[in-house]
Amino acid sequence: MIKFKKLLNLKKSTSNSTITSYAPLELYIQPSDLDITKKIHKIDYIFNDSTITHKLFYKKTTTDTIPFPDEIGDPRNYIVNKTFYFTTTGYSQTYGVSAHIYEMGVSQPTKIEFNVYLRKPPMDGNVQNAVFQSVELLYTRIFGVNNDILYVFETKNPCYYLPITVNWTNKPIVENMIDLNSTSKRRAYRILQPFQNKNYENPYTIEFTDKQAEADNDPNFPGCT
Amino acid sequence: MSKLEQTNILGELWLRNPSGKIIPSQDALSAIYLKYSILDSPIYFDLKYNAIKRFDFFYDVVFIETKNGFIFDKIDFESNAIKPTDSDNRFISTNNCNKSPDYWFDEVNRKIYVTYNSIVFNPIYRTAVITVVVYQFDIVKNIYSSKLSYDIILNFCNNYYYSEEMSSDMLCELLEPPKMSYNKDTRCFDISFILRGLNREFGLINTILKKSDTLNIDSINCLTPYSDLNSITVNMNYNKTLETDFYD
């Protein structure tokens, strides 16, 4: 699966900032440059669906090279990572992230709050990070009592034929926009998420012989030019 | 070479004539060529100079698409020669941003449904307007007429698509030809096409048409990942009664 990665240096000045990226975003939050003078005993990273906590702890010896070797248990020694996915049908989605930093002897935590602004990754076109050079519609068939539609797309660089069944009235919760795991049995492209039917939800699922997967696994298979 | 690129290659058409001889279309379809020569149609020169993109046959109807347009013409056999049944001008231009057609052949009722689309910039709406046209060709009665035309007006957020400088050619390149199919269970047509963003990113527009006495728009669906949509408006240009089907 394609993931876009970013590293964020957590500082007080991070507050009210916005990180813009394509989804899914794997965000690494590095607190080692935190501009706080007192000793920190806990950092809570609060996301919309979970909270990750790092507490001060003590360890006798270590050979690791870390930013604060005298305080191996300092929460600033530990990078936190979190993956953000699209969960709506919109063009963009914003997540709020809050880091609560608890200092020794201070009752109220220092709060650093920032936004993660996600956009759907471009499928193709003259843009950076496009998955394909181009995607073209080759063929459609509408079928069944629910008017499911089979779309067959042709892509260039990399070259694939992508058969997809879609029901425009069925909008399941989105997890990943694109999943390019070519080793899976079924092609895992999610070009038309959130409209694409999941196999288990679609009574008209067509089982395709995955010729592309066979080609992927064949070192002698000629590529397209 | 991709499948799509293959459909854009120009070439020469050869046919087997009623006596079984394989001859170039200039000879086999000479009466059709002559018809469009008399009509002074641009397709005549395409046919003459072998600028043929696609062809198909549906019983006694021939479909030919060239670089400038396409025809669906009913043919007749007379004295071992192929002749057009009538002198009507069946040529539809694919210049001026009209895209290549797609078609669905209803073999039971002997009707061909043809669709093509085009895009123009509308300064009133400050956005692009896509026009979709559907023709019905009753090949038994030899009646070929436009039955439905509607505009899809996509009002993007933040005036996306709005640009005084954008030429019609640039805008035209963002729209791709439609694909058409029919669901006999629900009597619905699907017309889908790609509408690209300003950086040529992928987007998909779909219309479901319910067939009864006329073709009625059941739903319009859009996936435009490059920009949010404020609204989708449909403007019906005309919606005419279809030729009667023999069988449902």
Image (tube, coloured by chain):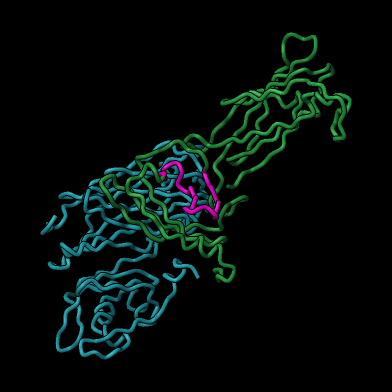
Chain colours: A green, B cyan
Taken as a whole, is the magenta stretch helix, strand or loop?
A: loop
* Residue at 34%, 71% in the rendered image: B65
* Residue at 44%, 74% in the rendered image: B9
Can see residue B150?
A: yes
Q: Is residue B209 left or right of residue B230?
A: left
Q: Is residue B244 above or below residue A75?
A: below
Residue A185 on the magenta span = yes
B168 and B180: which is toward the camera = B180
Residue A163 on the magenta span = no
Residue A10, by quadrant, is top right
A176 and B54: which is toward the camera = A176
Can see residue A225?
A: no
Q: Position of residue A77 (x, y in %)?
A: 79, 29
Residue B4, by quadrant, is bottom left
Q: Position of residue B183 (x, y in %)?
A: 25, 53
Q: Is residue B115 left or right of residue A37?
A: left
- Looking at the rendering, the stretch of residues picked out in magenta corresponds to A177-198
Q: Is residue A218 left or right of residue B212?
A: right
B191 and A225: which is toward the camera = A225
Q: Position of residue A165 (x, y in %)?
A: 38, 50
A31 and B93: which is toward the camera = A31
Q: Is residue A52 above or below residue B76?
A: above
Residue B66, by quadrant, is bottom left
Looking at the rendering, in which quadrant would you find the C terminus of chain A?
A: bottom right
